[in-house]
Image: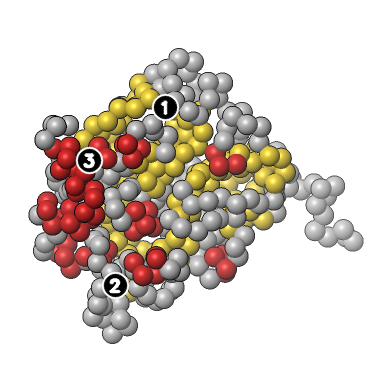
Amino acid sequence: MNPIDRPRRRFLQTVGATGALALAGCLEGDAAEDSNGGSNNSNGDGDGDDGLPPAETPDVDTIAADPTDIPDPVDWNEPRTHEWHIQTEEHVAEIEPGVTTRFMTFEGQVPGPFYRVRVGDTVRLTFDVPDEYNRDIHNIDFHAVYGPGGGAVDTTIAPGEGSETIEFTAKYPGAHIYHCAPGNHDQHISLGMFGTILVEPEDGLPEVDREFYLGQHELYLNGETGEEGHHHFDFDAAASEDPTYVLFNGEMGRFTEDGDGPGPLHAEVGETVRVYWCNGGPNLVSGPHPIGNVWTNWYRDGDVISDPARHVEGSALPAGVTAIGEMEMKVPGPISLVDHALSRLVHKGLHAQIAVEGEEDPDIFDPDPDT
């Protein structure tokens, strides 16, 4: 970075998203129309009959990340260098049918991509905020980075300003979150800007049959849950920690039997399944619980060095932390993944399922013992 630019970057971060955008000349035209979806403004005045702003047509079918899209486990024994390019994209998409908002994403998905390295590896990251997709200032803060703001100070960019490159060495193993931290941290994380980087220890993690990656987050919006229309971010609701939705991957019911997405995840009897549960937050503590199973191994707070806890029914997972849970698939049937703060399941939308297929074992579970 040019030494002259460094103080300017820190000023942009300090003044927050609206000041940065105004300074960069980016908050104009149609950007101003949706300022509450990408600025420091509080509750915008909706001019629809229902009090919501006019509907916006989704410009992507979904922003929900595929939970199976995970890099292969580390299979190298010496440190290596990774070249990554990450860009931010803001997209209007449906939360559920007829309900839209403008999501903020890394690489067009919620949560952001799953990154996997080995302790001692070096990452050379080029970060970009193209004006084609963005109305707001963004950056990236890796919890796996020793450095100012986890890299956020030196990746703070307004739309179209150009890219920034940083380099870091992964010095400590674990599953760590990354997120946007531009001043309005809560808004950007709530709308989808968070993800996981897994730093594997030198000897790697135990082998499993399948891995899934889910991102829990809260949406704070200026409409009621299920109210049709286009919703903007509500800063007052966020400050009160009163979410409109609590979701996996930005979409209600996408990974369930009754949802509009691809349906439940898949596993087979006899397999061991690993789940990376990333609680982006930005505020609520989660209680990860598999209904119909148990966490055979639970790596609390993403700790892959200590021995995992065994046979854990549920745990407390703070906002801004990724934990790892493993399950042994003993019998067929659906397993529901829920936050055991169950109002989030019943009223706010947080639910995913794993459909387990295979032979029944009545010695373990017999649904009709009298026949």
Q: At 21% across and 43% down in the image, what residue appears?
A: 10
- The kind of residue tagged 3 is Asp
Task: Kindly identify which residue carries mark 3.
Answer: 128
**Disc 2 or 1, which lies upstream in sequence?**
2
Q: Residue furthest top?
A: 78
Q: At 39% across and 18% down in the image, what residue appears?
A: 80
- The kind of residue tagged 2 is Asn
Task: Kindly identify which residue carries mark 1.
Answer: 170
Is 307 displayed left or right of 275 in the figure? right
In this view of the protein, can residue 256 be seen by the observer? no
Q: Position of residue 113 (x, y in %)?
A: 39, 41
Label 1 neighbour load within 10 Å: few <14, some 14-19, many 20+? many
Q: Position of residue 150 (x, y in %)?
A: 35, 37
**Disc 3 or 1, which lies upstream in sequence?**
3
Q: Position of residue 81 (x, y in %)?
A: 35, 21
Q: Is residue 191 above or below residue 160?
A: below
Q: At 80% across and 58% down in the image, what residue appears?
A: 367
* Label number found at residue 43: 2
Q: Is residue 300 above or below residue 137?
A: above
Label 3 neighbour load within 10 Å: few <14, some 14-19, many 20+? many
Is 163 displayed left or right of 218 in the figure? left
In this view of the protein, can residue 148 be seen by the observer? yes
| Frontmost residue, 25 versus 72 | 25
Residue 95 lies in quadrant: bottom left
- The residues tagged by marks 2 and 1 sit, at their Cα atoms, a distance apart of 40 Å
- The residues tagged by marks 2 and 3 sit, at their Cα atoms, a distance apart of 29 Å
Is 243 displayed left or right of 41 in the figure? right
